[in-house]
Amino acid sequence: MVDSFKQSIDSPIQEIQHDLLQSKGILLLIKRDDLIHPQVSGNKWRKLKYNLLAAKKEQQNTLLTFGGAFSNHIYATAAAGKVFGFKTIGLIRGERIEPLNPTLAYAEEVGMELHFISRSDYRKKEDIVYQQQVRANFGNFYLIPEGGTNERAIKGCSELVEEVTSQLTALPDYWCASCGTGGTLSGIIKGLDGRQKVLGFSALKGNFHQKDIEELLGEKKYNNWQINTQYHFGGYAKFKPTLIDFINTFKKENNIQLEPVYTGKLFYGIYDLIKNDYFPKGSSILAVHTGGLQGIAGFNRRFSNIIT
């Protein structure tokens, strides 16, 4: 059943209409990866694709991964395990808090075995000795890193470029995506192989993405990309009322749902750059909607349904 991952995804591309875009002479397109699958959506499908195929090839029937309490990756891995017949184990940062939030409740409901570990142990997730201890505790499994980002995930994300090439008559001038672990952006950069310009919008506070993505890209160097760090709104999962207002207005105007951790910040940043003439008149922009909408339920539970 996991072989269905080999099939083409072909998520649609949608043009956004807005007075700002018309006045600035900008074409804005959205690659709707949020429509790929109801649960395994967005960049998670692309990141998991070759990992699950590798797990099958290695005859592994258990997936083990790491994530925070509201992790899109935990949610998607649990869903993929259910759909494609893998047992799943999630090592979750922090203590178990009842009732479980919607993300973890769903993961457990579809069969993921949740284990809560201390923050100090969580920081060891990439340590070989710690991973050996985990294997001693849980037996044999296929390990997927936090966020799903590894070489196989980058390969899956790079296919987005080939897919867009088949859907459009010309490649957009700018490719934009949100940055968490950097896997999606690395895949786009690799897929473009030096063509066009790539902008990553950091969802986290700090300047570490440049180094992380350079490491993910490996030996080949590209000079057509950069990371924008101006629109993190205070850091990972942080927000301000202006961001929430933007998300709600964007949905009302375009019937497209964004979320406050990644895609809301991405599109807020794109609109702000357009407003300030960052993109030359006549530019075309492709923004990748990486999904993550499952997190809205937990966000609204914490903050009184402020996302409409």
Image (cartoon, rainbow, N blue to C red):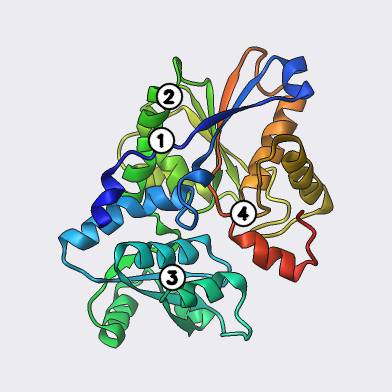
Question: Mark 4 sits on what residue?
Answer: 204
Q: Which label belongs to residue 10?
A: 1
CA separation in Å, label 2 and label 3: 35 Å
Q: Amino acid at mark 1?
A: Asp
The residue carrying mark 3 is: 66
- The mark closer to the camera, 3 or 4, is 3
Q: CA distance from mark 4 to mark 2?
A: 32 Å
N-term mark: 4 or 2: 2
Asked if marks 3 and 4 touch (Cβ < 8 Å), the reply is: no
Counting residues from the N terminus, which is met first, the one under dot 3 or under dot 4? 3
Residue 173, how many percent across, how many down?
53, 20
Amino acid of disc 4: Leu
Counting residues from the start of the chain, the first of labels 1 and 3 encountered is 1
Q: Is residue 9 left or right of residue 38?
A: left
Q: CA gap, disc 1 to disc 3? A: 29 Å
Secondary structure beneath dot 4 equals loop
Q: Amino acid at mark 2?
A: Gln
Write the residue at 60% across / 54% down.
293
SS label for mark 1: loop
Residue at 71% of width from left, 30% of height from top? 273
